[in-house]
């Protein structure tokens, strides 16, 4: 049988599509159904390595929520922004240079056959496919080249939820305006409206939902309360500091600053730090943000040289160097590791030449071929503030261009991961690794913080419980073409 498709659309980016889609994946999986996620086109620098290449992190986590193996068909087109006007195009997990150089409006016809085939393949193997849209389906300037919203909904004969962020204000106008800009056939696909991130007295919503139903014929099927501690990584952008459950607690035992440069990537790997009690996490964009940091973390970057130039322009580079000189802990991951070295060398105009921060005696040479792989490794003896990592196993992933090696004219750094994957300085306070996923290892978290965090499985179950409590009874089963039945597994 061909799977029924349930699609999550949003009135804006950040409305909550990814979270609701992940919750639906686990909810349907708990009904005993074979479920897969799907997003035709994702624009994000947060990616995960799967069999065949890389996909957006949101679909990776949604697949885990669905209790299935993540794969490239679940996100056939991934766009990774490199500048404000150019993105690297990943088609079925692999970099496609022709597509990357193609004008935006020309991509639709080029990628649609691949998108359609991927969705058809998943539908042939599943009971339910949970589809996530992108941005808003009412972006009428892009409707002619759409490959991710209503074109997908029509192709999949999907029943759609339209989600809005009521905390931002204007939710009823967003819902009505989005509905009004769809054509008559597409409007019929909207099964229900969802008010997300609601705070306050629910009685104050009336008569809004009924007035909206009178105008559109569509009922509001769920009002989801604001829930900051759900534990799922944000898909887009940097976490707002007010959203950190421990981020503003006085008396935090550890102050960690993550430098939030413009092309930050793979920030989802820091979600476990947000979930740890007693850790105060700051996203640093100015020198003052580093003032009280115990640790400074340089995360991944989609454009290392440009982000390094931004560090210097913002006055952050000198503060990081002084922090390290004073014995403060510094950690660089992937692009952050490359920044810690002496120099970035680019013979092929891939990323750009630049002097490094000079905190590790390393040189990075950018290469045209991209390293994308799962990595199983382990730390050797580690010194200084990072010594708790000694002997720890690490199961993570690499996504980078460039090969990093010791500077031949300088005293060698200490190798802490084999195969050119990790080094530290002689003093032991500066550490650089190529492998993403350090803070997703339970053993690492226990070694560094003496604490654990909720497992991903418990996070997904919590999301399923959340929507089960707040959706109208029977709506989700009806959307999947099923009738409510007594005794369904919880």
Image: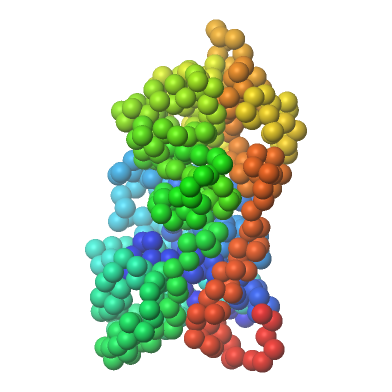
The residue lying at 55 percent from left, 7 percent from top is: 409
Rendered position, 269 above or below 235: above
Q: Residue furthest front?
A: 251
Q: Quadrant of the N terminus?
A: bottom right
The reply to whether residue 110 is in sight is yes
Q: Position of residue 346 (x, y in %)?
A: 43, 23
- As rendered, which of 21 and 201 lies closer to the eye? 201
Rendered position, 342 above or below 170: above
Question: Which quadrant holds residue 71?
Answer: bottom right
The reply to whether residue 56 is in sight is no
- As rendered, which of 146 and 279 lies closer to the eye? 279
What is the tally of numbered marks visible in this picture?
0
Asked if residue 336 lies left or right of residue 164, the reply is right
- What colouring method underlies this structural image? rainbow
The residue lying at 36 percent from left, 61 percent from top is: 13
Q: Position of residue 148 (x, y in %)?
A: 40, 64
Q: Residue furthest right?
A: 391
The residue lying at 49 percent from left, 86 percent from top is: 472
Q: Position of residue 325 (x, y in %)?
A: 49, 19
The residue lying at 57 percent from left, 37 percent from top is: 371
Rendered position, 442 above or below 147: above
Q: Position of residue 116 (x, y in %)?
A: 48, 66
Q: Quadrant of the C terminus?
A: bottom right
Question: Which quadrant holds residue 331?
Answer: top right
Q: Residue furthest top?
A: 409
Question: Which quadrant holds residue 305?
Answer: top left
């Amino acid at each position: 049988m061909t799977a029924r498709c349930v699609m999550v659309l949003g009135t804006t980016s950040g409305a909550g599509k990814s979270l609701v889609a992940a919750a639906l994946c686990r909810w349907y999986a708990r009904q005993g159904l074979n479920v897969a996620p799907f997003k035709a086109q994702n624009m994000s620098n947060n990616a995960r390595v799967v069999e065949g290449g890389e996909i957006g992190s949101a679909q990776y986590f949604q697949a885990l929520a669905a209790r299935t193996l993540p794969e490239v068909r679940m996100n056939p087109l991934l766009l990774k922004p490199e500048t404000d006007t150019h993105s690297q195009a990943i088609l079925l997990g692999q970099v496609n240079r022709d597509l990357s150089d193609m004008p935006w409006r020309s991509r639709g016809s080029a990628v649609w056959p691949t998108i359609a085939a991927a969705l058809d393949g998943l539908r042939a193997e599943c009971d339910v496919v949970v589809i996530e849209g992108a941005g808003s389906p009412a972006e009428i300037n892009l409707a002619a080249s759409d490959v991710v919203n209503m074109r997908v909904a029509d192709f999949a004969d999907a029943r759609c939820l339209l989600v809005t962020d009521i905390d931002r204000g204007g939710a009823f106008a967003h819902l009505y305006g989005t509905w009004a800009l769809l054509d008559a056939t597409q409007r019929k696909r909207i099964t229900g409206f969802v008010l997300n991130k609601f705070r306050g007295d629910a009685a104050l919503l009336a008569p809004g939902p009924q007035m909206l139903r009178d105008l559109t014929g569509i009922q509001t099927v769920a009002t989801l309360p604001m829930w900051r501690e759900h534990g799922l990584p944000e898909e887009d952008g940097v976490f707002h500091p007010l959203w950190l459950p421990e981020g503003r607690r006085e008396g935090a035992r550890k102050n960690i600053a993550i430098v939030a440069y413009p092309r930050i990537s793979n920030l989802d790997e820091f979600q476990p730090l947000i979930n740890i009690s007693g850790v105060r996490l700051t996203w640093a964009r100015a020198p003052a943000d580093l003032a009280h940091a115990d640790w400074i973390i340089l995360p991944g970057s989609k454009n290392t040289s440009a982000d390094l130039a931004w560090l210097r322009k913002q006055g952050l580079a000198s503060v990081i160097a002084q922090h390290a000189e004073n014995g403060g802990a510094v950690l660089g991951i992937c692009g952050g590791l490359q920044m810690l070295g002496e120099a970035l060398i680019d013979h092929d105009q891939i990323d750009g030449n630049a002097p490094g921060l000079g905190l590790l005696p390393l040189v990075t040479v950018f290469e045209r071929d991209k390293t994308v792989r799962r990595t199983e490794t382990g730390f050797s003896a580690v010194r200084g503030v990072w010594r708790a990592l000694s002997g720890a196993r690490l199961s993570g992933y690499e996504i980078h261009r460039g090969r990093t090696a010791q500077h031949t004219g300088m005293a060698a750094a200490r190798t802490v991961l084999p195969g050119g994957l990790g080094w530290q300085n002689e003093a032991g306070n500066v550490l650089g690794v190529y492998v993403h996923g350090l803070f997703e290892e339970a053993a690492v978290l226990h070694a560094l913080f003496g604490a654990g965090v909720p497992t991903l499985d418990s996070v997904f179950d919590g999301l399923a419980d959340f929507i089960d409590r707040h959706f109208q009874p029977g709506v989700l089963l009806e959307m999947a073409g099923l009738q409510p039945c007594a005794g369904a597994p919880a």
